Image (cartoon, grey):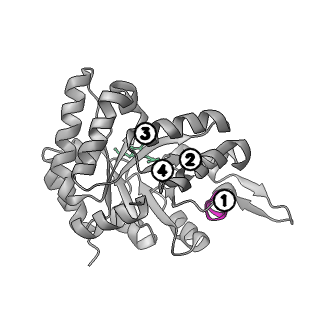
Amino acid sequence: MSFDARIQNASEQNNSRTVLALDLEDPDPGRLAAKSEEVLRKASPYICAVKINRQLVLALGLRHGVDQLVGVAHDLSLPTIMDAKLNDVGHTNEFMMRAYMETGFDAIIASPMAGWENGLDSVFKLAKADGKAVILLVYMSNPGAAEFYSLMIAERGGGMKPMYELLAEKAVEWRAHGTIVGATKPQIIERVRRLVGPNLRIYSPGVGAQGGDARMAFDAGADYVIVGRSIYNSADPGETAKEYRDASKIG
Ligand code: O7M
């Protein structure tokens, strides 16, 4: 089943548009794996996908580590997103993409800054052949994001536009599944929604701990919010995930 179908199914089944960011920390790998699995299981009825970062890959490894969490997510009918922020030349991107796909991930996050030719072309090709999704960074949630994503660039035919608008256009041109736009910038979510049209998905991180508001992100046009610390650091991750779910109910 494609990532698109998987996330839609999970979203409908759990009536949720929350992606859980599983970024827990613990110096002991065994405890880290157990804690991550516990949070995932508790939040699972209230989320539509799980996103795993490189910090977990560094601590646990892909084999006999992160792959087991991916398996647990799949057993719970949840799709998995690898937040690799791929940003290298073609052959190493391809190597990393293959490794993440073999681990069972359904979607990958990449940075469009690598460009297409001998950059992200290999990633999109592999993804397309196997029903995987590519999600591109378009505007990050941290304050420093403005330094580059808002940088005004000259257009070929004259005129100027901010960098993130070009990145949103690239997401459409390259047929990405979706984009990342920080929840801390609802007006930019609105602008990106206008640029990418109704079909490209907008994932919005930065909710809660970073000051973004889920409702504002949805109202501005986001399809999904990505939430980490507010859920896994709460006293009751299941209950907190449920509160996010209820705040973003589809119908
Ligand atoms: O809810 P938090 O702040 O604890 O975590 C947010 C998650 O979203 C965390 O996993 C970050 O890596 C991720 N994220 C951002 O916080 N901001 C961004 O601009 C982009 C991402 C992200 O998911 O990039 C793909």
x and y percent of residue 27 in the render? Answer: 27, 20
Task: Measure how far apart labels 1 and 3 are at the Cα level.
Answer: 27 Å
Q: CA distance from mark 2 to mark 1?
A: 18 Å
Q: Disc 3 designates what residue?
A: 102
On residue 145, the disc is 2
What predominant SS class does the magenta segment belong to?
helix
Q: Is residue 162 magenta?
A: no
Q: Are marks 2 and 4 in contact (CB under 8 Å)?
A: yes
Mark 2 or mark 1: whose residue is earlier in sequence: 2
Name the residue that disc number 1 marks: 170
Q: Is residue 176 in view from this perspective? A: yes
Instruction: Name above or below for residue 202 compared with residue 116.
Output: below
CB within 8 Å, label 1 to label 3? no
Distance between the Cα atoms at labels 4 and 3?
30 Å
CB of residue at label 2: within 8 Å of ligand 1? yes
Say which element carries label 4: loop
Q: Quadrant of the C terminus?
A: bottom left
Look at discs 2 and 1 and give the one toward the viewer.
1
Q: Which residues are magenta?
A: 165-173
Left or right: residue 74 versus residue 84 is: left
